[in-house]
Amino acid sequence: MILDVGKVAPHQTYNLLIGLVAPRPIAWITSVDLVGNVNAAPFSAYNYVGTDPPIVAIGVGNRPGPGVIGKDTARNIRETGEFVINVVNEELAERMVLCAVDFPPGVEELAIAKLETAPSSLVSVPRILESPASLECRELTTMEIGRSRVILGQVVAIHVKDEFVDPSGPYIRAEQLHAVGRMNGKGAYVRTRDAFFHIPRMNYQEWLAREKS
């Protein structure tokens, strides 16, 4: 199969991309509007793209239908300049999906999902208390490209529950955190529980030694 993306409907390209660029981490974003209402929504077009300074990128499409109507998360970030990315593990996966429902205005996703919030340390947006880890972020820029927005944010603080931190690095005890990833667009997710395998990275001298042995 060969798909010329210039000759097909956008949803066909979308269906293939989200199944091939996988598994993807999930940015469960909390944001607030100008009057302080908290919004929570998951996005899987997400990753870190820099560490000095620490930068994350999130892709947020417009709402379906004609016209350019941004989603609440994109609008809130544009208006306040702040947001929090909350990590999703197995225990929270179903409640995260609840927050993806297109509820009518005025409905609080966090209340529907029976989730609590806690104050952040450097930004005004609260984090999800039950999440194993949260990244406090400030918007660097938002690029509008077609019907999508690419939001770049700088991570200014990181919360991680103590049981998931190996202080020797510090490193994340990923085998215990049990994060989940997004797969295709048919409701498929992937677990990381009992799924790790390790391949040590070699330097050039180690590679030479291996080739000679």
Image: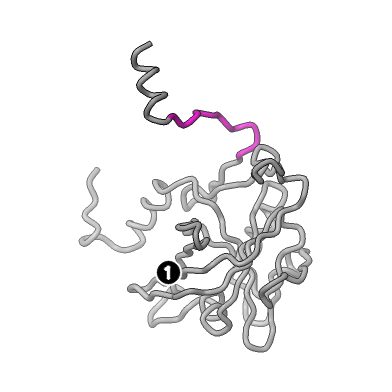
Residue at left 61%, top 62%? Answer: 28
Residue at left 56%, top 46%? Answer: 189
Image check: 16 left or right of 99?
A: left
Could you tell me what secondary structure mostly forms the magenta stretch? loop
| Residue 136 visible in the snapshot | yes
Give the residue number, with chain letter if any, for mark 1: 150
Residue at left 65%, top 74%? Answer: 39
Task: Residue 208 in the image: state x and y as whole percent.
Answer: 35, 21
| Segment tinted magenta in the rendering | 192-202
Give yes or no for residue 101 being in the magenta stretch: no
Q: Amino acid at mark 1?
A: Val
In the rendered view, tell whether residue 68 sits above or below residue 55: below
Residue 34 sits in which quadrant? bottom right
Give yes or no for residue 200 being in the magenta stretch: yes
Kindly state the secondary structure of the residue where label 1 is placed. strand
Residue 174 sits in which quadrant? top right
Task: Residue 201 in the image: state x and y as whole percent.
Answer: 46, 32
| Residue 178 visible in the snapshot | no
